Image (cartoon, helix red, strand yellow):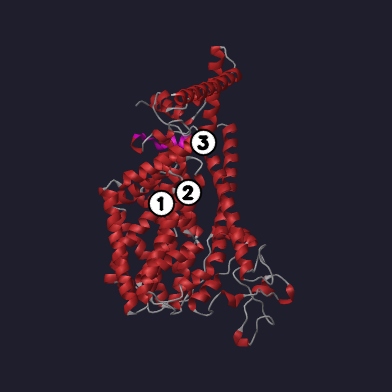
Amino acid sequence: MSTTEAQDTTKSETTPVGEDSAVKSRKDRPTGSTHFGDADWDEERPDEIGDATWGEVAKACCVHDAKEWGKIFVGACGALFFLYFFLFALELLGNSAKVLGGCRAGGLLSDETNPVAGLVIGELATALIQSSSTTTSIIVSLVGAEAISVNTGIYLVMGANIGTSVTNTIVSMGQMADGAQLERAFAGATVHDIFNLLSVAILFPLEVISHYLYHLTNAMLPDSVGDGEKWEGPIKKIVSPFAGRVLKSNKDVIKDIATGKVENCDAYYPVLCLDGIEDYKHCASKCDKDAGEEVGVDCGRVGLITCDKTTGCPAFFQNGANLHDDSISGGVCLVLSLFLLIVCLMGLVNVLQRGLAGMSTRIIYKATNVNGLIGIVIGAAITILVQSSSITTSVLTPFVGLGVIQLEQMLPLTLGANIGTTITGLLAAMVSDNVDALQVALCHLFFNISGIVIWYPIPIMRRIPLRGARALGRATRRSRLVPPIYIIVVFFVIPLLLLGLSSLFMQKTVGFTVLGSFLVIGVVLGIARFIWWWKKQEGLQKCLACLDRRTDMNSTMKTLPEDMQFLKSKVSLLAEHTGLPEDEEAGDAQKGSDGTAEEVAAENEEVAVEDKEE
């Protein structure tokens, strides 16, 4: 292509002005390229997208007139506004989940368990409190306090790796209004789930058999660990204070229950503030038991909701509150955070759609198509800054839904997020002076590195999580119930089933062990029968046909009022064409019906009379 042709192509694909702005299909463009917002945007496959030059990307990004720069500035301000409150909603969601599930999560983490139970407990605890960083920090602290062993801590962090992906899966449901966006967003969210599940499927039995993570990290341990300082990322410093003014969770409750300092949450209630003054000093300052200080005399007492040294007590803090009151506050904030999350997600998506309208897919994918290793580094760096892999993947999921980031680019970013989230555990281990705590944190790091080595470098292995995520995304086209059912089954039903089975073997009695063995055999046979039905007896086709029937029925019910109005209008036209008013037709039909009935009755009477005479 000549320079002049390249310039003409760039102009037509990056500047939707004049007649080109009215073109809404790649079929009507000389270059055949698809632009963001086209009617056939979803029909273009990734292998059909042409390759742009960095010069074209730079021109599309930086060459604008004053009016366009003004629109870009307003759009950027709008995007930052919605992004900030999106992060705020995620922070509030995490705080609410900790208030609602903190007691249960602490109880789950409190005991020594078998490997399967440890894996499930780590997943459930993370799903309950919506933060793998918090879970891993607590696990590291438990190991440092010698409340649980290093081996148990390894299985717990494996489970935490699975539970952390529930947040972005929930976020993907915010794009349910658009079927194409939901398909891409759900695929972008579940590629994280599938990678973590596949890594656990390989590395969990390997660790049970060989303890390779334990031995690998044990060889790397120093003789001692010096005390460090807790580090807080810059995004947390920006978002957390505002969220803390609404609701601030007390993480010490989870740690104290897990370490056995208290039996349950009742030990923290009722909430008590000295002299009835609601601030950090009078409510949340801790008693020095060595100095003989007592609760209610020298210091206050807080429950699942606490106060902050700088921002004070949050809006939902209540002096004299009991566990039920705090749980209600957590539930209210959970609903508010989900509502705000959806609103901000819709606003962010709308702003991005307007900003990208008319942009060629060649330009977009060239700008976002980075090398896989660089993508992993970017994902890790972002996660270290925000100190949460859930936030990283949740922010990126809407971009996948819009089609700005391809699924192939989302995978390395999520892998980087898995690496970045281990930094929180390492920092928690640095605060502890126990080398065992550092060992668990290192196991978390090398578990994620091992998963990446297995599933990412080799193309044929990399395609497995990508194909699985695409299949789940396509399933949302058939039914919008797929995402909530997926979340309930994968993150709660199956883990609870495994936890129940493993608990039978933990009783250490012959009866429960035999019962558990029979149940395990039954579950294995049931799974084998299901696979046979799914593969050999057209189970997949039957499920898809059922979903298609449900989709057709829903679409029919939605269009039924319009269809009825259309039929009525056609009947009216037919009546006008025949020259008979509708009411006369109805009357004639009624008369005809009545007359026919009378004739039939008369004939029957005549037949009866004749029979009588005979």
Dot 1: few (<14), some (14–19), or many (≥20) neighbours within 10 Å? Answer: many
Dot 2: few (<14), some (14–19), or many (≥20) neighbours within 10 Å? Answer: many
Residue at which label 3 appears: 558
Q: Which mark is residue 181?
A: none
Would residue 11 be found to the left or right of residue 526 on screen?
Answer: right
Image vertical order of residue 250 relative to residue 15, above or below: below
| Whole-percent x, y for residue 557 in the image | 50, 36
Q: Quadrant of the N terminus?
A: top left
Camera-side residue of 396 and 52: 396
Amino acid carrying mark 3 in the image: Lys
| Whole-percent x, y for residue 306 in the image | 62, 69
Camera-side residue of 34 and 345: 345
Q: Tell me how far mark 1 sits from mark 2, CA to CA.
A: 9 Å
Q: Main secondary structure of the magenta part?
A: helix
Of callouts 1 and 2, which one flags the residue occurring earlier in the amino acid sequence?
2
Amino acid carrying mark 2 in the image: Ser
Of callouts 1 and 3, which one flags the residue occurring earlier in the amino acid sequence?
1
Q: Residue at 73% of width from left, 73% of height from top? A: 276
Residue at which label 2 appears: 172
Residue at which label 1 appears: 190
Camera-side residue of 117 and 532: 532
User: Range of the magenta residues?
Assistant: 48-62
Residue 449 occupies quadrant:
bottom left
